[in-house]
Each structure stands twice: as C-alpha cells, then as structure tokens.
Image: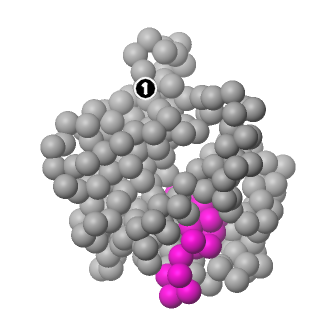
C-alpha cells in the first residue's frame, strides 16, 4: 500500500516526530499476530494525524474503524489532557487487543471505544468533533462522511484513509485487481471532488489520505 521507495519512506519516518513506543508495541503485535496487519495506519500516517491534531488544537476526535487501536492511541497522544478520542468499531473482539495496550499508556484514558454498526452509532451521537478519521468499510464511506460532516465543529476537518486503494482507483493502473471496494472508493472520491462546498486535498501518503473541510 506504499507508493514510494521504502528507503524514502524510512527516511521520512526517521526525520518525523512519530507515535510513542506504546504504539510501536501495538504495531509489532499486530504484524506478528493479525493476518490483516497491513490495515494498521503505521508511523508516518500516525505522525500526520498527530500533527493535524496539534496544528488545529483539536480536543475532540472521532474515529471510524478502531482495528487494533494504533491510530486511536497515536491521536490520543497528541491531544491535551482533557481531550478525547471516540473510536467506533463493529467488532467488539478488538477490545481484547487494543484496551490492554491503551491501559499501559498514560494517554489511554483519553480513548472511549464504542461498538456496533457505525451508521447506527453515528445516529445516536449528540456530541461534536474537531477532527474525524474515517478508516472503516469502504462501501459506507459516503454515508459515514455525510453523518460525520453533521457532527463536525466549525473549522474542523475530516481525514479519510485508503482513498487510493493501492493505486486501483486510477483508471488503467491495476484493472486486473479491481474489486467492489475500488468501485466504492472511485465513487466516493468523485463525489468529494465535485462538491463545491468543500475544501479538499488528496495526498499520496501510504494508501491515500483525503483531507476535507467545509468552506
């Protein structure tokens, strides 16, 4: 899912402020024990998320797609003492992996996990957020985005992961590997790009990151 020379990626990581050793422990465990370890956002993306939080002075973060808890902790580390990450995942079993790692960190107390279908959980939320990170099932990206936009504070931003999908979203790039998720992501990217009420930048970092704000 990386588009650049691994040596350049390693150099970039080495020159960046990256998530803590507690996050490194989550990454190591995930790589060694989870067959879908490639889904973990990683150090460079974690560094970017933390930078965006600090830059915007965000205090409330919403995450869709907890996985093994790396990104939630990376973002919690960047929040002030009274900040909070609300992270939603449909699979409650992930708590058995993520929570023990969070509990080892002083920043773990800033994380509030919620479980269930994100579309339904979002309908029940009555709070608003400064930053939203969407990294869940691709079929529902548009629905997630619309619901998260209504929960976004003025000046807030939505960060959407995996929008390049290993390059498959580019016509002719990798047609033999096209799948339903590719179709969903192409449709989502086109939908965002055509909305004149949004400011957006698509970055070719890792598997593609869309940064989106209201005008």
Query: Residue 98 lies in what quarter of the image?
Result: bottom right
How many numbered dots are placed on residues in this image? 1
Relative to the observer, which residue lies in front, 74 or 11? 11
Please state if 35 lies on the left or on the right of 168 as rendered: right
Residue neighbourhood size for the residue with mark 1, other residues' Cα within 10 Å, grouped as few (<14), some (14–19), many (≥20): many
SS under mark 1: loop
Query: Residue 81 lies in what quarter of the image?
Result: bottom right
Relative to the observer, which residue lies in front, 152 or 141? 152
Point out the image quarter for the N terminus. top right
Coordinates of residue 159 in the picture (x, y in percent)? 42, 53
Q: Which residue occupies 33% across, 36% down? A: 189
For the question of whether residue 49 can be seen, the reply is: yes
Relative vertical location of residue 192 with respect to residue 92 in this rendering, above or below: above
- Among all residues in the image, which is located at the extreme bottom? 82
The range drawn in magenta is 65-83
Please state if 61 lies on the left or on the right of 22 as rendered: left
Relative to the observer, which residue lies in front, 7 or 138? 7
Quick check: is 197 in the magenta stretch? no
Point out the image quarter for the C terminus. bottom left
Q: Which residue occupies 73% across, 40% down? A: 11
- Among all residues in the image, which is located at the extreme right? 32
Quick check: is 74 in the magenta stretch? yes
Coordinates of residue 173 in the picture (x, y in percent)? 49, 15
Q: Which residue occupies 69% across, 33% down? A: 8
Please state if 95 lies on the left or on the right of 215 as rendered: right
Mark 1 highlights which residue? 169
Q: Which residue occupies 28% across, 66% down? A: 155
- Among all residues in the image, which is located at the extreme front? 15
Coordinates of residue 33 in the picture (x, y in percent)? 81, 51
Coordinates of residue 150 in the picture (x, y in percent)? 24, 65
């Amino acid at each position: 899912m990386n588009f650049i020379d691994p040596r350049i990626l390693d150099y970039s990581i080495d020159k960046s402020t990256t998530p803590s050793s507690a996050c490194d422990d989550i990454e190591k465990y995930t790589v060694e024990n989870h067959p879908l370890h490639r889904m973990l956002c990683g150090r460079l993306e974690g560094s970017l998320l933390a930078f965006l939080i600090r830059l915007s002075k965000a205090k409330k973060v919403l995450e869709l797609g907890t996985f093994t808890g790396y990104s939630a902790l990376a973002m919690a580390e960047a929040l002030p003492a009274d900040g909070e990450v609300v992270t939603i995942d449909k699979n409650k079993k992930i708590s058995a992996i993520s929570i023990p790692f969070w509990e080892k960190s002083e920043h773990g107390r800033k994380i509030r996990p919620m479980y269930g279908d994100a579309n339904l959980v979002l309908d029940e939320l009555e709070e608003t957020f400064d930053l939203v990170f969407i990294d869940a099932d691709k079929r529902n990206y548009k629905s997630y985005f619309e619901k998260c936009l209504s929960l976004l504070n003025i000046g807030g931003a939505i960060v959407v992961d995996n929008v390049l999908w290993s390059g498959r979203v580019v016509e002719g790039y990798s047609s033999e590997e096209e799948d339903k998720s590719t179709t969903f992501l192409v449709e989502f990217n086109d939908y965002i790009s055509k909305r004149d009420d949004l400011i957006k930048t698509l970055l070719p970092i890792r598997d593609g990151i869309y940064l989106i704000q209201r005008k």
